[in-house]
């Protein structure tokens, strides 16, 4: 199997001078055309073969009229950055590309002279090389191979990627991704100043596609609803493909002079393209097309016969599947056979399987160039929706799906509101958004955002949001403190501990309803069974949405007795479900500091978890024996492993930290991307 790649090379500027004369009758004579021939040796791997080439030039006539510019006899549009395909000029077996610039002046006056200055000249080549022998990793990170090792840069307007390598494959020396549950999701990248010039593509607003650890996103049915169950199928043919999409794409041959609209697909010189700029060019101009590669851009990998498939949606032609390795996509139904419905044992095995690695897209926001490197930071593309604004809205308590409908319906002027897929968590939420709020704020605000109110598990899959029940995905890992290790930090925070809850409902007249009538001497609270473990009482006032005379969820009017029973149930749930009487336990693990120290083995299991996964945490010396969730990580996308990971309460937020829906001062995003945010939200 061959490996395809691409590289870009900067070419020095050039001035071309052309002259001409006209006699009194208007006849042109004494024409001097300007030419300049360049030979560029392109640097590609030793075992690689050039397969394609194109050159882009910005042409500006500093003196004289409009000109026609050609490269190797192929026309370039005047005064615009355009590209010419030089693939036909490649000499087999050679890495040297020779091309000739030529200009013709506009004969509109006598004794004319014109200077054409060519700048920002970039030569881009594609090549193929034999697939290298695979290296053996004695303990590779679990997950799939999609986009592994490939960090690509794309045009800022791109929304469909498939197998495209974009504008170039980047070769950074550092590429890390940080994600917090319901919070920050950002990229940090360093790239050397390389001779091939690809570093020039690293610009604000460009998109960088990076492989990261991902929690599983559920399947979506034809109505847009979330599908939670599975059937077991197997691949019954010799092999089948796993696809990014369940629709076929046709690639008709490109036709010179035909009008192409944005989104049109064509095939040219053995490669697939999608139109990004409307055009009717008579020559092939690569710059107006997205290069989707040589194969089917929607195909991800091949699956062998007998492979088990977890199928969530079975259509007439396509199955929506998940592999045991965590990879998701679509398979052709004709290549697969139904076995049975999935049992709970099957589902549990799926939950404890290794998490997957999938490509996510980040928009660059800040770029700094120094003599030896380019440093860039970016935000996950879900933050693109922080440029949209909402009208003010304040509604009574509702379920999460209804609140999401309210959110989308109240975005002002947006033609592309965010896709938000929702699983009802059973918790009532309120929609109290001031005018000018953004969809990102409405989702992520740690105080009034939908994620915090509904205690939902948030998965951001490029431009899509998934708000799911914070389930019990437990992979069977236990972290027990035995010896102190550098790189492992245990923290207990008692600031939010509650030992007594006072639930308060409403009487028929709207006045407060407590658990007993005699508030002065009666017991109006519910106490934690662990209250004696603390030297002082920590109180909480719990407002319960019950009112005497109004209907309960079953349609029966609340009486004083049934209202108080519901108040007591919700107060007890603060201890049994929310564990409000336990301190917040945080475990921070920095893998680089651990190395191969004795006692490290148990922490190695954390290299296979995903955000929101549950882990048993035990520290007998300080009285910890509890479940904690993965609430944040920093991921090294070059080495495909975690740099650090944090476990604890995913809904406990440091009030001094920058919230995930806020943007740091001084970045391009605080000035432009989040221009709709109020000033007090970005301090």
Image (cartoon, grey):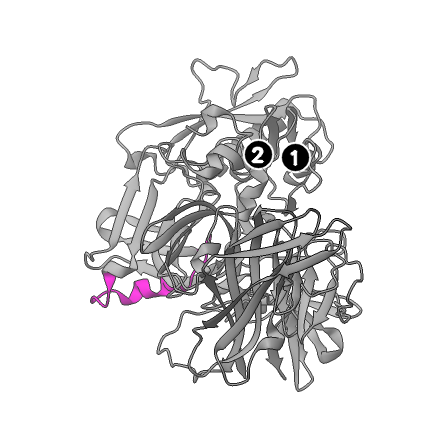
Q: In this view, does 271 lie above or below 502?
A: below
Q: Which residue is drawn at 35% across and 61% down?
A: 173
Residue 174 higher or lower than 183, as above or below: below
- Which corner quadrant holds the N terminus? bottom right
Say whether disc 1 or disc 2 marks the residue closer to the N-terminus: 1
Measured as percent of width and height from the top left, residue 393 is found at 65, 25
Residue 23: in sight, yes or no?
Answer: yes
- The residue wearing badge 2 is 442
**Quick check: marks 1 and 2 in contact, CB under 8 Å?**
yes
- Which mark, by number, is residue 353? none
As rendered, which of 306 and 288 lies closer to the eye? 288
Instruction: Say which element carries label 2.
Output: helix
Residue closest to the eye, 107 or 171: 107
Location of residue 160 in the rendering, given as x and y in whole percent from the top left corner: 64, 58
Over which residues does the magenta segment extend?
A: 594-613
**Residue 81: within the magenta?**
no
How crowded pointer 1 is (Cα within 10 Å; few <14, some 14-19, many 20+) is rated as many
Q: Dot 1 corresponds to which residue?
A: 407
Q: In which quarter of the image is residue 253?
A: bottom right
The answer to whether residue 301 is seen in the rendering is no
């Amino acid at each position: 199997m061959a490996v395809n790649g691409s590289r870009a090379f900067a070419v020095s500027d050039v001035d071309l001078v052309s002259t001409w004369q006209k006699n009194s009758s208007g006849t042109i004579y004494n024409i001097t055309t300007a030419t300049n021939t360049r030979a560029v040796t392109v640097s590609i791997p030793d075992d690689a073969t050039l397969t394609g080439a194109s050159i882009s030039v910005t042409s500006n006539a500093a003196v004289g009229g409009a000109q026609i510019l050609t490269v190797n006899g192929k026309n370039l549009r005047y005064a615009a950055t355009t590209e010419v395909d030089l693939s036909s000029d490649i000499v087999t077996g050679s890495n040297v590309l020779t091309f000739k610039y030529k200009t013709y002046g506009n004969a509109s006056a006598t004794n004319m002279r014109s200077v054409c200055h060519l700048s920002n000249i970039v030569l881009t080549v594609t090549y193929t090389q034999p697939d290298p022998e695979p290296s053996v990793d004695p303990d590779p990170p679990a997950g799939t191979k999609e986009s592994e090792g490939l960090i690509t840069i794309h045009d800022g307007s791109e929304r469909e990627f498939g197998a495209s390598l974009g504008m170039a494959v980047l070769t950074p020396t550092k590429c890390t991704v940080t994600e917090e549950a319901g919070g920050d999701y950002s990229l940090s990248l360093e790239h050397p100043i390389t001779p091939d010039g690809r570093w020039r593509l690293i610009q604000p607003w460009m998109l960088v596609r990076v492989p990261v650890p991902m929690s599983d996103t559920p399947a979506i049915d034809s109505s847009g609803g979330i599908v939670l169950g599975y059937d077991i199928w197997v691949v019954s043919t010799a092999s089948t493909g796993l696809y990014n999409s369940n629709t076929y794409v046709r690639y008709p041959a490109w036709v010179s002079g035909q009008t192409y609209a944005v989104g049109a697909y064509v095939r040219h010189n053995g490669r697939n393209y999608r139109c990004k700029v409307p055009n009717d060019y008579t020559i092939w101009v690569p710059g107006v097309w997205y290069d989707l590669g040589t194969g089917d851009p929607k195909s991800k990998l091949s699956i062998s016969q007998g492979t088990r498939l977890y199928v969530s949606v079975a259509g007439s032609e396509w199955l929506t599947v998940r592999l045991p390795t965590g990879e998701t996509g679509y398979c052709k139904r004709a290549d697969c056979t139904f076995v049975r419905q999935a049992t709970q044992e099957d589902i549990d095995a799926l939950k404890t399987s290794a998490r997957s690695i999938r490509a996510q897209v980040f928009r660059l926001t800040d770029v700094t160039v120094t003599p030896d490197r380019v440093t860039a930071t970016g935000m996950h593309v879900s933050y693109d929706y922080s440029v949209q604004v909402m009208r003010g809205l304040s509604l009574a308590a509702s379920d999460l799906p209804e609140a999401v409908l309210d959110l989308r319906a109240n975005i002002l002027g947006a033609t592309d509101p965010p896709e938000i897929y929702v699983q009802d968590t059973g918790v009532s939420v309120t929609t109290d958004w001031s005018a000018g709020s953004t969809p990102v704020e409405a989702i992520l605000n740690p105080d009034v955002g939908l994620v915090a109110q509904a205690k939902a598990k948030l998965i951001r899959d490029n431009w899509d949001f998934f708000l799911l029940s914070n389930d019990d995905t437990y992979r069977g890992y236990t972290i027990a403190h035995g010896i102190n290790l550098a790189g492992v930090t245990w923290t207990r925070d008692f600031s939010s501990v509650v030992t007594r809850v006072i639930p308060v409902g409403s009487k028929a007249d709207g006045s407060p309803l407590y658990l007993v009538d005699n508030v002065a001497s009666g017991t109006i609270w519910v106490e934690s069974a662990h209250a004696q473990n603390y030297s002082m009482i920590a109180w909480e006032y719990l407002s319960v949405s019950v009112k005497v005379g109004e209907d309960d969820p079953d349609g029966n009017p609340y009486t004083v007795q049934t209202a108080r029973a519901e108040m007591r149930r919700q107060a007890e749930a603060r201890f049994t479900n929310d564990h409000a009487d336990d301190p917040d336990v945080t475990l921070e693990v920095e893998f680089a500091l651990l190395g191969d120290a004795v006692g490290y083995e148990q922490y190695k299991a954390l290299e296979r978890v995903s955000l929101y996964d549950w882990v048993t945490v035990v520290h007998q010396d300080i009285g910890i024996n509890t479940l904690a969730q993965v609430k944040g990580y920093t991921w090294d996308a070059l080495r495909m492993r975690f740099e650090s990971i944090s476990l604890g309460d995913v809904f406990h937020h440091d009030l001094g930290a920058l919230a995930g829906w806020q943007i740091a001062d001084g970045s391009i995003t605080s000035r432009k991307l989040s221009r709709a945010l109020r000033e007090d939200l970005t301090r």
